[in-house]
Structure formats: structure tokens, C-alpha cells
Image: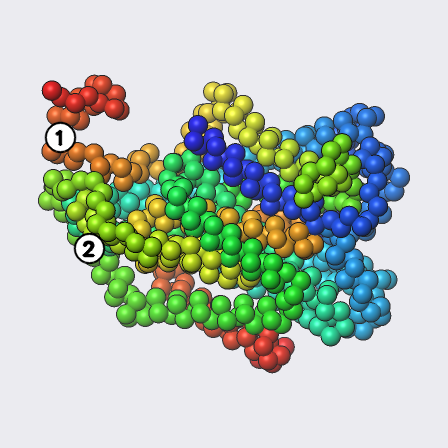
């Protein structure tokens, strides 16, 4: 029964997320009567081809207004209505090549299944650089800032869709397994909700592409530094030590030396205050700050929502490092928190009228799935260390390039 | 995505018929949405099943590693060994990460037709408002196609899963995709129960008397 409720709640949250365009519609446009509207669709007067050119721009009012405000012409930073519709149906916008989108998404999926967190970054790089959407948005920096920001928001929301998917499935799985600890998930979720909503509300329609690119680059640089430390001697030594300790314990259990002793059972609260809870669990002392999960949820979700990256890979280490939470508590609750954060962020962006190119999202989803399936078969030929080093180089390049382009308008290449 | 739009237009005759089954616009729209969603769910399910079967060994290895380390961490706590607990828990996290992303890929394959359906719906119904007989707070009386289409997708998916699982043939297909040794993750609640060695006799009683067991007098 609990599983059923979790499924229903998850489904409702997902529904709210994807139904967001409903709210995004500007009611200023004169609504038609429903039957008439549906009849119009059921017996189309126009040929589908003609309808197709109507543009794949959902919640188009904000976008259409932004397009209307842009100067008309054939120069950069101008809209040429004679040109074919491209991304989001904007005349003259880049036509994202389906094959390229698919191949890039396979690459993203492959990274997801081999290195994990870096997949979200690469999804962002695809939207911004590989498909040329960033450069296109940038051309409107001076001539049509509103269009620049609308396209930027669309890129952010698209990233969220791709990276948030894993949180959705993970939450469903944890719900099914009964491994969600709801009080903690609610605390973390509230923080996530607040962080994601605040971040999306404060930034929707306000962030220029250059600013977004700069901050994204800074984040990637940070991630690169972390990966670098992870593969350094110090990082490896720490890992190796943990591995050895885990192995030693496993051997001890096998040899019946540990794991079945008559340890004190139960939870004993030693002390509790607003900022600290001390307790023993099976005789082991634990302490955590109950405010930290909420604060962490706010900060991490705000960053994740702003950049359009997952956030799960930040939350899990945060929870285990700060609260020493066991794996299933940290992973399950952070998955739910990421899901809350993602949905809040997408919902907030879309209620602000952010358009989504569903065709592109669908193509990328297929690619990511293919990449995720191929990944495990190919990654065995590459060591974890080598893979991470490849990504360190990529992270440094992308990070530095984006920071320079975004904040200083300086291009290393191109 | 010009190429993709051409594809959508080519697909149009194969989809639009479902929306024309009735002269009553509302009925046509709802029946069409239901059929299109059912096709999405079925296509997604088939591809997801194939992917799970294809990657059964990989998923199983990830899953078993995750469960093994997690259960070891429970045992470490049981023996009050905090250092071992932290070390094993770290390993469990790494294993979880791999399993997490592998499952995300499989899930993406179950949902992939939906965005394409939405793109087609946008082409056909985008910008066409529908009046509701009542007002919904925050939405108003005028809505657009996702208001009906997405809930129908979720309802279809849930109903499809429930109905299909009643069919023995489908259950066999699911068994065909099962991964891992089937070992259960221990709950930390286990730690509040008496230890297995200390209460070996109680375990025997538990097996006889069901999961709750009975206290020996």
C-alpha cells in the first residue's frame, strides 16, 4: 500500500512538472471554446505541413513576445522571418541536427553510466556549444535581451529534464523498496524546494546567456578540481584505505569474527538541541546537526536549479560527510530531494513562460538510454582512473573556456 | 530540428485518425490521447524490457555489489565497529552510484516515446485553448492539451502495469529481465532485533511462526 502511495505521489509530482506549460500560458490571448478548439484540431483546415511551421514552441507567448521585440533583419542579433524555423520555432535559429543530437546524447549517456555526475555537465555543453544554441542566444545580448534570456532559460530547463530523470526513477525504486525515510526526505525536500524555487524565481528571465555560461564554467572547473583530487595520490590513498578496511571487515564477517556479536542494540538519545543531536545506535556514537540537511538542501538545490545540473552527486556526499548517514538513507532521501528540486525548478521556469523543445528532449532521451546501455560494456576496457583523467582535462578545458567566454567575452578558440 | 518536423508530419496520418473516431470533439480528443498514450507506454515498455534483458548481467552485478556492501555496513554497526561501518558504507555508495545511473538509462527507455508524442501534440494542438466547465485555482478556466494528455499518460502507464502483471505470460517476460541474486537489503530496523547468533533458537521459531515469530517462554 505504501508503495502504491509513493507511486501515486511521484506520478502527481511528475504530472505537475510536465503540465507546467498550462500555467505558463498567458491568458491575454482570447481563449476559444473548448469544443470548437478541439474540433479545429479534429478536422484540421490546414495541412499538417502548414501546422508544422506553427513552430514547436510550447507556451509560446513569452517567446513570441520576445521574438516580436527583436529587431527584424538579416544581420546577427536580428530575426529574419523569411528564414526557416529552427530551435523553438524561432525563424533563423540553429536547426539542431537530429543525428548530432542523438550522437551527443549517446555520449552523455555513456558518461552517465561510466563516470556519473559529469553527464549532466556534458548535456549542458551539448545544448550550449555543440548545438550552437549558446552562440545564437548570445547574438541577441544587445539587440533583444529578452530573447537571449528566454533561450537561456530553455537551455537550463532542458538540462534539468535530462538530469532529473535519474532522480525520478531512483525515487520510484526507493519508494518500492520502502527505503525512503520520509522525515529526513521532507526536511531535505523542503530545503530543496526552497532553494530550487528561490533560485528559479530569482533568475528566470533575468540571466543572460553570458552570465549563465560563466557560472556554469565555474561549476565545471570546481568539479574538475574535485576529480583531480580524487585521482591524486592523496585521494587514491583515502579510497584505498577505505577499500582495505571494507575488505578486512568482509573477511572478518566471513570468518565469523564479527558482525554477529552481542552488541548493544537500539537507539539511545544522549543529547538533543536545535543544532546538535547525539545518539548511540548499536553502541556506536553518532551526532548530527538537524538544521544542516535543510541548509544543504537549500544551497545545493539552488546551485543545481540555477545551472540545470542534477545535484544528487552533491547531496549524497554532503549527507554522508556531514551527518554520517548510512548509504540507503542518504541515497534514497537525496534522490527524492533532487526530484523535488528538479520539478520545482522546471515548474518555476515554465510558469515564467520558458519554452521547451520536446523533439530535442525526446531525441536526447533516446540517446542517453542507448549510451547508458552501451557504457558498461565499453567501460571495462578503460580504467576508472583513466576515465576520470580524461574528464579532468575536459572539465578544465570547458570550465576555463566558459568562464572566459561568459564573464570576459574572451574566446580561446573560435 | 527541420528533419524531425518532417518526420512528425509524415507520422501525422498514422496518429490523427485516433482523434477522429468521434464527431464529438471532446470524445475524439480524449480517445485519441488515450490511444496515443497507450502506444507510447507499450513502445516504451518493450524497449525497456529488451534493454533490461540485454544488460541483465551488468545490472545484476551492480545491484549485488550495492546490496552486499550495504548489508555489510549493517553488520558493522551490529558489531559496533564504526570505522568498518564508515569504510563499508563508502563502498556501498560507489556501488549505488553505478546502479543508480544504470537504472536511469533503463527508465529513459521506458519513457522515450512521450516527448515525441508531446512534440506531435504541440504541432497539432499547441496554442489551442480548451474551456473547462469550472475554474481551477492557479489555472483558471482555460487550459491546453498537456492538462489532459499528461494525466492520461500517467493513468495509462499505471493501469497498463497493473493489468499486464495479471497476465502469466507478461510475468514470465518480467522474470526474463530479472537481475541480481535477489538478496534483500537489510533494514537498520534489523539492528533493533536480537542478533542472529544470540537468538538462533528464536530464528527457528520465526521460520515456523512467520515473520513476526513468537517469543519463547
Instruction: Name the secondary structure under disc 2.
Output: helix
- Identify the residue at horizontal 56%, vertical 50% (top origin): A344
Q: CA distance from mark 2 to mark 1?
A: 26 Å
Q: Residue at x 53, y 28 (%)?
A: B161
In this rendering, position of residue B201 left or right of residue A88: left
Q: Residue at x 50, y 71 (%)?
A: A218
Scheme of colours in the image = rainbow
SS of the residue under disc 1: loop
Question: Toward which corner of the image does residue A15 lie, by quadrant?
Answer: top right
Mark number displayed over residue B199: 1
Q: In the drawing, does residue A239 fall left or right of residue A11?
A: left
The answer to whether residue A35 is above or below residue A16 is above
**Visible residue check, residue A102:** no
Q: Position of residue B36 (x, y in %)?
A: 68, 33
Q: Position of residue B48 (x, y in %)?
A: 52, 38
**Position in image of residue A284 (x %, y %):** 19, 49
Residue A119 lies, in percent from the top left, at 49, 58
Residue at the image position 76 percent from the left and 62 percent from the top: A66
In the rendered image, which quarter contains the C terminus of chain B?
top left
Who comes first in sequence, dot 2 or dot 1? 2
In this picture, is A212 found above or below A331? below
Mark number displayed over residue A349: none
Please give the chain letter of the residue carrying mark 1.
B
Question: Depth check: A363 or A168 in front?
Answer: A168
Instruction: Please give the residue where the numbered disc 2 appears in the rendered image.
Output: B83
Q: Nearer the viewer, residue A85 or A315?
A: A315
Residue furthest right in the image: A45
Residue B192 vs B27, above or below: the answer is below
Amino acid at each position: 500500500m505504501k508503495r502504491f502511495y509513493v507511486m501515486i505521489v511521484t506520478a502527481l509530482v511528475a504530472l505537475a512538472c510536465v503540465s507546467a506549460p498550462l500555467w505558463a500560458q498567458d491568458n491575454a490571448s482570447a481563449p476559444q471554446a473548448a469544443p470548437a478548439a478541439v474540433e479545429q484540431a479534429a478536422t484540421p483546415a490546414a495541412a499538417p505541413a502548414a501546422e508544422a511551421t506553427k513552430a514547436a514552441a510550447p507556451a509560446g507567448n513569452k517567446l513570441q513576445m520576445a521574438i516580436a521585440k527583436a529587431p527584424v533583419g538579416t544581420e546577427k542579433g536580428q530575426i529574419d522571418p523569411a528564414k526557416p524555423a529552427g530551435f523553438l520555432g524561432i525563424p533563423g535559429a540553429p536547426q539542431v541536427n537530429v543525428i548530432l543530437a542523438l550522437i551527443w546524447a549517446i555520449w552523455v549517456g555513456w558518461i552517465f553510466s561510466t563516470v556519473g555526475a559529469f553527464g549532466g555537465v556534458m548535456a549542458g555543453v551539448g545544448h550550449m556549444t555543440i548545438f550552437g544554441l549558446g552562440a545564437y542566444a548570445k547574438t541577441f545580448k544587445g539587440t533583444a535581451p529578452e530573447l537571449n534570456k528566454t533561450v537561456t532559460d530553455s537551455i537550463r530547463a532542458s538540462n534539468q529534464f535530462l538530469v532529473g530523470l535519474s532522480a525520478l526513477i531512483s525515487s520510484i525504486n526507493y519508494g518500492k523498496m520502502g527505503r525512503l525515510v520520509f522525515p529526513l526526505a521532507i526536511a531535505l525536500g523542503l530545503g530543496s524546494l526552497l532553494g530550487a524555487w528561490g533560485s528559479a524565481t530569482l533568475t528566470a528571465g533575468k540571466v543572460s546567456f553570458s552570465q549563465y555560461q560563466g557560472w556554469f564554467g565555474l561549476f565545471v572547473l570546481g568539479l574538475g578540481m574535485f576529480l583531480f583530487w580524487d585521482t591524486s595520490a592523496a585521494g587514491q590513498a583515502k579510497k584505498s584505505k577505505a577499500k582495505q578496511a571494507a575488505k578486512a571487515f568482509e573477511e572478518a564477517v566471513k570468518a565469523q569474527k564479527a558482525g554477529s556479536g552481542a552488541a548493544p542494540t537500539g537507539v539511545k538519545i544522549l543529547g538533543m538541541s536545535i543544532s546538535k543531536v547525539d545518539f548511540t545506535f548499536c553502541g556506536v556514537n553518532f551526532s548530527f546537526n538537524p538544521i544542516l540537511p535543510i541548509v544543504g538542501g537549500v544551497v545545493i538545490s539552488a546551485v543545481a536549479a540555477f545551472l540545470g545540473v542534477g545535484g544528487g552527486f552533491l547531496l549524497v556526499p554532503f549527507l554522508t560527510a556531514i551527518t554520517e548517514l548510512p548509504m540507503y538513507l542518504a541515497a534514497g532521501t537525496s534522490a527524492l530531494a533532487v526530484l523535488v528540486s528538479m520539478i520545482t525548478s522546471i515548474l518555476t521556469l515554465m510558469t515564467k513562460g520558458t519554452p521547451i523543445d520536446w523533439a530535442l528532449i525526446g531525441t536526447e532521451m533516446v540517446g542517453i538510454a542507448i549510451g547508458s546501455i552501451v557504457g558498461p560494456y565499453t567501460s571495462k576496457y578503460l580504467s576508472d582512473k583513466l576515465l576520470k583523467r580524461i574528464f579532468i582535462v575536459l572539465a578544465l578545458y570547458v570550465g576555463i573556456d566558459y568562464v572566459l567566454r561568459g564573464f570576459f567575452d574572451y574566446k580561446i578558440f573560435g | 530540428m527541420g528533419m524531425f518536423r518532417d518526420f512528425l508530419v509524415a507520422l501525422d496520418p498514422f496518429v490523427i485518425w485516433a482523434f477522429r473516431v468521434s464527431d464529438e470533439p471532446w470524445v475524439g480528443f480524449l480517445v485519441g490521447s488515450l490511444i496515443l498514450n497507450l502506444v507510447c507506454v507499450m513502445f516504451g515498455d518493450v524497449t525497456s524490457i529488451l534493454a533490461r534483458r540485454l544488460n541483465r548481467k551488468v545490472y545484476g552485478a551492480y545491484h549485488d555489489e550495492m546490496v552486499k556492501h550495504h548489508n555489510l555496513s549493517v553488520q558493522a554497526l551490529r558489531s559496533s565497529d564504526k570505522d568498518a561501518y564508515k569504510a563499508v558504507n563508502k563502498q556501498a555508495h560507489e556501488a549505488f552510484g553505478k546502479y543508480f545511473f544504470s537504472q536511469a538509462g533503463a527508465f529513459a527507455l521506458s519513457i522515450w516515446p512521450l516527448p515525441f508524442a508531446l512534440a506531435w501534440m504541440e504541432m497539432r494542438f499547441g496554442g489551442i485553448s480548451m474551456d473547462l466547465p469550472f475554474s481551477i485555482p492557479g489555472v483558471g478556466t482555460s487550459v491546453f492539451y498537456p492538462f489532459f494528455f499528461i494525466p492520461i499518460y500517467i493513468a495509462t502507464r499505471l493501469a497498463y502495469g497493473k493489468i499486464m502483471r495479471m497476465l502469466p505470460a507478461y510475468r514470465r517476460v518480467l522474470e526474463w529481465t530479472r537481475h541480481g541474486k535477489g538478496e534483500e537489503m537489510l533494514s537498520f530496523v534489523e539492528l533493533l532485533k536480537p542478533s542472529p547468533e544470540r537468538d538462533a533458537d528464536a530464528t527457528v521459531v520465526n521460520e515456523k511462526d512467520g515473520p513476526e515469530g513468537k517469543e519463547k517462554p
